[in-house]
Each structure stands twice: as C-alpha cells, then as structure tokens.
Image (spheres, rainbow, N blue to C red):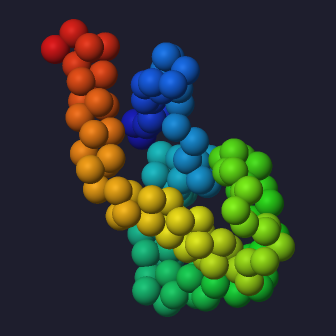
Amino acid sequence: MTTTSSIVYWNREKARYETEKVYGESFIKWLYETKSGLTLADHLLSKIFISQLYGMYQSSFLSRHKIKKFISDFEIKMDDYESDSFSSFNDFLFEVLKAEQDIFLKVPLLCRHFAKVAILDLRKHLAI
C-alpha cells in the first residue's frame, strides 16, 4: 500500500508552511492505506444504507458530544456562537460553515482579491 502525505500549505500570516488538519485523519488513513480498511470500505462502508445511517447519527442529538473536541482540535473561534446551542454535530457544522460562506458571498470582490494575492504569493514562494 502507498502512504499518503500530509496536506501542507503556506500560511501567509505566519510566513511559514503548516500542515492541514484533517477530520478523522487516522481513520481515513487506515481505511485507504490498509488491506483491511479497503475491504471494509468496499464491502460495507460504501453501501448507501451505511451512509444514510451515519448521516442520521451525525444529525441526531447523539453526535453533540463531538462538537467541543472539534472546536478545540480545529481551533474554531466561537465568539459568535454558543457551543451548547447546537442540536447535533451536523447542525454545528452547517451553522459554522454557513457563517464562513456568508462572509464571501457578501463581499465577492474581496474573494477575488484574496485569490489574486494567494496566487501571487504562491508564485513568489515557488519562484514561478
């Protein structure tokens, strides 16, 4: 089996390379990099029923316990949210991602500016 490398990106604010955090990284690596994981994925986890069941779990109150650890692991600034106000993990993700998306939907010129700056920054660091 081949092993995947980490996702590395250039953090312009800190002027250094950093490794992207991946939710469930150890499970994903096991799933796609081991024979037993690939077998499980092919024969069980890829079934629609399992996907729907997992989605129902993530949308249920049973998944709420994952929220605080996710906030901590991914260093999410929760100034605008109350971490106890979410009914499920999916509810939490939807609200946080929606808030992030709203920023860019309201300011499309800012998005283009950031994209241009990122491309120029990448060219500078890769000497393109």
Residue 14 point in image, percent of width and height: 55, 21
The residue at the point 53 percent across, 65 percent down is 99
- Name the residue nearer the viewer: 60 or 108: 108
Residue 90 locus on image (x, y percent): 61, 76
For the image shown, how many numbered marks are present on the structure? Answer: 0
Image quadrant assignment for residue 87: bottom right
- Seen at 53% across and 30% down, the residue is 19
Q: Can residue 93 be spotted in the picture? A: yes
Indicate whether 124 appears above or below 120.
above
* Residue 56 percent location from the top left of the image: 61, 88
Of residue 22 and residue 26, the one placed in the foreground of this image is 22
Q: Which residue is drawn at 44% across and 66% down?
A: 102
Q: In this orientation, does residue 57 appear? A: no
Q: Which residue appears farthest toward the top when viewing the image?
A: 127
Q: Position of residue 105 (x, y in %)?
A: 35, 64
In the depicted structure, whether residue 38 falls above or below residue 30:
below
> In percent of the image, x 31 and y 48: which residue is there?
111
Task: In this rendered view, identify the residue nearer to me: 12 or 45.
Answer: 12
| Image quarter in which the N terminus is found | top left
Report the quarter where the C terminus lies.
top left
Left or right placement of residue 85 versus residue 116 in this view: right
Q: Quadrant of residue 88?
A: bottom right
Relative horizontal placement of residue 41, taking residue 86 as reference (left or right): left
